[in-house]
Image (cartoon, rainbow, N blue to C red):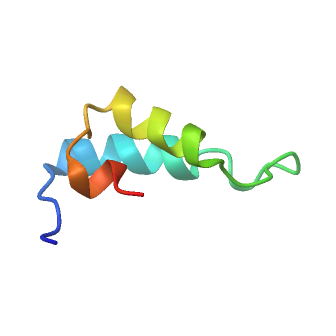
Amino acid sequence: MKGAMLSLQKVWALSQRWYGDRMSRAFRGRTLNEARAIFASLDLTDDFWIAD
């Protein structure tokens, strides 16, 4: 499977959503559905992002 090509702006938006709460004491990791929701919110919906 090929990787994904993202613009710098998209990478920045993804990193903010993915890592923004990592230092919180309440952080518990993400479920598969939570991860997919982050990807979908950034229109990252091709097979690379939603593969099982």
Q: Residue furthest front?
A: 52
Question: Which quarter of the figure is the C terminus placed in?
Answer: bottom left
Residue at x 12% of width, y 70% of height: 2
Q: Position of residue 44 (x, y in %)?
A: 26, 40
Q: Does residue 19 appear left or right of residue 3 in this picture?
A: right
- In this orientation, which residue lies closer to the viewer: 16 or 34? 34
Q: Position of residue 14 (x, y in %)?
A: 38, 45
Q: Does residue 24 appear left or right of residue 7 in this picture?
A: right
25 up-or-down from 2: above or below: above
Q: Does residue 10 appear left or right of residue 2 in this picture?
A: right
Residue at x 51% of width, y 49% of height: 18
Residue at x 13% of width, y 49% of height: 7
Q: Does residue 48 appear left or right of residue 23 in this picture?
A: left
Residue at x 16% of width, y 72% of height: 1
Q: Residue furthest top?
A: 41
How many numbered marks, from 0 up? Answer: 0
- In this orientation, which residue lies closer to the viewer: 28 or 51? 51
